Image (tube, grey):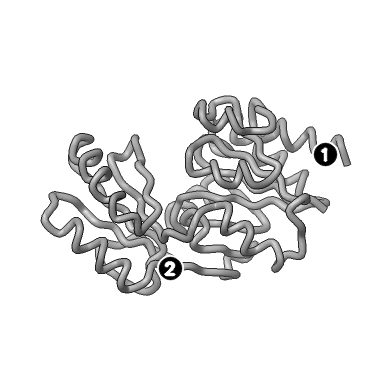
Amino acid sequence: MKIIISDYDGTIFEDEITTKKNIAAIARFRNQNLFAVATGRSYEDFMSAKIKNNIELDYYLLNYGAQILDKNMQPISITPLTKEDVAEIKKFFKEKNVTILYCNDKKNSLKESGAIFKIVVKFNNRKDLVDSYKQFIKLDSFNTYILKNHCSLEIIRKDVNKKESIKKFLPIIKLKQNDVFVIGDSINDLEMITQYHGFCVENAEPNIKAVAVKIYPHVYNLIEKLMEAK
């Protein structure tokens, strides 16, 4: 048995036609194998896409892997920010003109509630975003990603990334590293692509293409190749 673990935005989710082909191929693959998504999206953000596109998977690695759920959306493993982490982030951005969004196990909220897996900091302009990012990463306390299209920073724990979340849940599902095939398109996929059988899609960033074992036009092309090789 194999498992494919794929990024969502820009990988599974592309244009409407390609997305439908990807989802149909995933359903065929799951007849004899496993398929998981590893995404930076929060629970609320991914659920809206799941419902809209009728996506059924075996595992969901949300918030860059800080929240790992089974096919019934029940938690397998969680790695939330600590109270001290949240306090440090709030202190840093206190005097800045930003909006802070807290992503817990179900909702995105302007107020702290429950276990916080990710904090999103929204800026009014790109200059402030870049300046704050350069200052914030000097703390070296968190993993921080820039969302270029949303003028936002996404902040998670330092020990959380997609590679580490996969490593954490492989023993639970009783699969070995050689059974894992991953595919993505951007910098937050880098660690998992270099750790496992790592592939990327054609629209991937140049630094991701440079480390991928092979470049596939779309996710469904990788699925077809693996199903042929069984």
Confirm whether residue 100 shows in the render.
yes
| For residue 203, above or below residue 105 | above
Question: For the residue marked with disc 2, what is the amino acid?
Answer: Pro
Residue, disc 1: 227
State the residue in front, 228 or 155: 155
Residue 155 percent coordinates (x, y): 36, 54
> Residue beneath label 2, please?
80
Left or right of 153? Residue 75 is: right
Q: Residue at x 23, y 35 (%)?
A: 126
Taking the image as shown, residue 30 lies to the left or right of residue 139, namely: right
Q: Secondary structure at mark 1?
A: helix
Image location of residue 181, percent across then percent down: 71, 45
Image quarter for residue 83? bottom left
Q: Amino acid at mark 1?
A: Met
Circle 1: is it few (<14), some (14-19), or many (20+) Cα within 10 Å?
Answer: some
Marks 2 and 1, how far apart at CA: 36 Å
**Circle 2 sits in a helix, a strand or a loop, which is it?**
loop
Residue 153 located left or right of residue 17:
left
Taking 74 as reference, is 229 above or below it?
Answer: above
Of the pair 21 and 59, the residue shown nearer to us: 59
Q: Residue at x 31, y 49 (%)?
A: 137
The single residue placed furthest to the right in the displayed view is: 230
Q: Which tag is nearer the camera, tag 2 or tag 1?
A: 2
Task: Pinpoint residue 199: horizontal percent, then vertical percent.
Answer: 65, 35
Mark 2 surroundings within 10 Å by alpha-carbon count, few (fewer than 14), some (14 through 19), many (20 or more): many
